[in-house]
Image: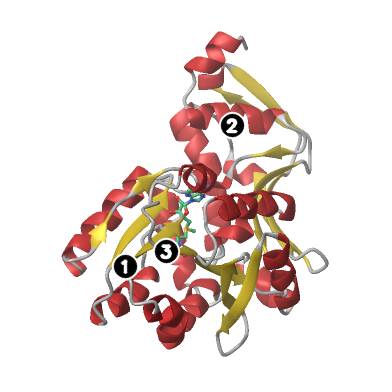
Amino acid sequence: MSAKKNLDLGSFAQDVLLGLSSKPKSIPSKYFYDATGDKLFQEIMAMPEYYLTRKEFEILENQHEAILEKILSKKEPFNLVELGAGDGLKTKILLRHLDKVGAEYTYFPIDFSGTVLAELKESLADELPNLEVKTIEDTYRGSLLKREWENGRPSFILFLGGNIGNFPLKEAHDVLDHLRIGTVFGDEVLLGFDLKKNPQTILDAYHDKDGVTREFNLNLLRRMNRELGANFVLENFMHWPSYNPVNGECRSHLVSLKNQNVDILDLNQAFEFEAHEPIFTEISKKYSLSEIKKLAQRSGFELKESFLDQDRYFADVLWERI
Ligand SMILES: C[S@@+](CC[C@H](N)C(=O)[O-])C[C@H]1O[C@@H](n2cnc3c(N)ncnc32)[C@H](O)[C@@H]1O
């Protein structure tokens, strides 16, 4: 494959080429979310085993007043900046409260998906027509370096949903270093962390009995078949999530069940899979409360308060930039 040919490829094709040429093989998890993947993820969030969304919802529903107390007590206009806003379903709990108390602020949702941002903006125009919304289509790190929201007002940054858990620790450190660069003294950050807990509870969330998470992972192969002219045979791969209670990493893999070659027409290339060779698809790292405190300290923030659900499964923690 020549360099010229690489430049002509779309980013999905380039990332697949890079990922399947690496050892171990991998596909970036952001490619889960095509129309089918979006639908499957909605199903995952509704599964009894997938506690994460429900638990964070509970925290925000029950404790939003305490979470927003300090920024509101300043009684001055502020920026509400959200990294990886998605559909904003949980954020709307905070937005509705801010609307109710007549807070003066601008909401800056950041997401690298322009489609997601357009949908969010439209739904907010319906639900909260007086809210000033300025969308930023960018990555976490790109947006934190550019700080387009900077206007002399204090900022309250949201990084919800365990988004930080989608990075292994070293990369999470890098993202948090960017968070430090993107904030000034006194800014507050609300971060979501899925907590370490009974390993079986964690594993079940990624390995449900109805096989929805399996379908969600296999959809990556379907997507390559459809969009890149690949010929993956889905029955020849199995979904294999695992949880390591030592480092808190829950990792998902698709494991090749036999020696096989897969052709990808758009890449003009065949990829060889040995029997039992894995493709890494996703990480979701779990933290303990003491690890979260240390993480705040090493990143230049002070842990102000931790808000937990009743079962202590999930935490939204308030950090202040020092
Ligand atoms: C799993 S959703 C969570 C959305 C929301 N924060 C929640 O808690 O429900 C993650 C969102 O972050 C976006 N995202 C993931 N990685 C990103 C990155 N590196 N930069 C910007 N957006 C990202 C995705 O497009 C998606 O909309």
- Would you place residue 232 above or below residue 121 in this image? above
Residue 251, which numbered label?
A: none
Please state the horizontal and vertical placement of residue 106, each as a whole percent of the image.
30, 61
Residue type at the position of mark 3: Pro
Write down the quadrant of residue 131 in the picture.
bottom left
Q: In terms of depth relative to the viewer, which is nearer, 235 or 208? A: 208
Residue position for label 2: 16
Marked residue nearer the N-terminal end (3 or 2):
2
| Mark nearer the viewer, 3 or 2 | 3
Write down the quadrant of residue 126 in the picture.
bottom left
Marked residue nearer the N-terminal end (2 or 1):
2
- Would you place residue 225 above or below residue 251 in this image? above
Q: Identify the residue shown where x is 66% and y is 74%.
A: 195
Please state the horizontal and vertical placement of residue 290, each as a whole percent of the image.
75, 76
Q: Residues within 10 Å of mark 2 (few under 14, many from 20)?
A: many
Q: Identify the residue shown where x is 57% and y is 16%.
A: 268
Regarding residue 129, the answer to whether it shows in the image is yes
Residue position for label 3: 154
Residue position for label 1: 77
Does label 3 point to a residue whose CB lies under 8 Å from ligand 1?
no
Kind of element beneath mark 3: loop
The quadrant of the image that shows the C terminus is: bottom right
Q: In terms of depth relative to the viewer, which is nearer, 159 or 178? A: 178
Q: Identify the residue shown where x is 62% and y is 85%.
A: 312
Q: Residues within 10 Å of mark 1 (few under 14, many from 20)?
A: some
